[in-house]
Image: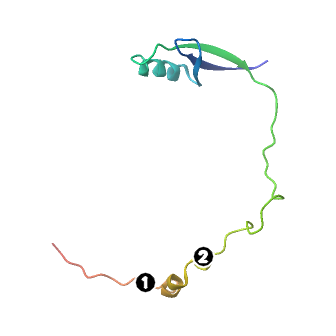
Amino acid sequence: MNEYPFYRVYDENGQQYCDCGWEKHAQEIIILNKDVQRLTYKKINAPILDQTVDITATGIAELPGQQGLPSPVERLHDDIRKSLRKPFEPLPQSELFEI
């Protein structure tokens, strides 16, 4: 059976403090907390279960109105829509002041 090693950090009462994927991270947590509490860590070899989980999503339970957003122009307020420029119209140039 395959195993996945990880490192469990314990507080001074023997209660689990956190889990780390890398030993270096467990050691860093212990160093960061040295003035707060005494922590220890232990390597744990957890079995990897040979299971495949299907995570494909299906769109059968969508609420009404969630089929897609309207186009960006349709979402704008009327005043903003009226002030929009024509597509590909160049922006006006500002005056250049040399310093």
**Outermost residue to the left:** 99
Residue underneath mark 2: 75
The residue positioned 55% from the left and 11% from the top of the image is: 13
Task: Kindly identify the amino acid type of the residue bearing the numbered disc 1.
Answer: Pro
Dot 1, crowdedness within 10 Å: few (<14), some or many (≥20)? few
**Outermost residue to the right:** 60
Q: Quadrant of residue 50?
A: top right
Please provide percent x and percent y for residue 90.
43, 84
Label 1, label 2: how far apart the Cα atoms are: 24 Å
Task: Kindly identify the amino acid type of the residue bearing the numbered disc 2.
Answer: Arg
The residue positioned 46% from the left and 21% from the top of the image is: 28
Left or right placement of residue 20 versus residue 92 in this view:
right
Find residue 2 and name its label. Answer: none
Dot 2, crowdedness within 10 Å: few (<14), some or many (≥20)? few
Please provide percent x and percent y for residue 89.
47, 85
Left or right placement of residue 23 versus residue 35 in this view:
right
Q: 21 above or below 52?
A: above
Secondary structure state at the residue bearing disc 1: loop
Please state which of the two labelled residues, at mark 1 or mark 2, is closer to the viewer: 2
Q: Quadrant of the C terminus?
A: bottom left
| Dot 1 and dot 2 residues touching (CB under 8 Å) | no
Q: From the viewer's side, name the closer residue of 14 and 56.
A: 14
The residue positioned 39% from the left and 17% from the top of the image is: 35
Q: Quadrant of the N terminus?
A: top right
Please provide percent x and percent y for residue 66.
73, 65
Whichever of labels 1 and 2 marks the residue nearer the N terminus, that label is 2
Q: From the viewer's side, name the closer residue of 65 and 46.
A: 65
The residue positioned 81% from the left and 35% from the top of the image is: 52
Figure colour scheme: rainbow
Residue underneath mark 1: 90
Secondary structure state at the residue bearing disc 2: helix
Please provide percent x and percent y for residue 31.
43, 18
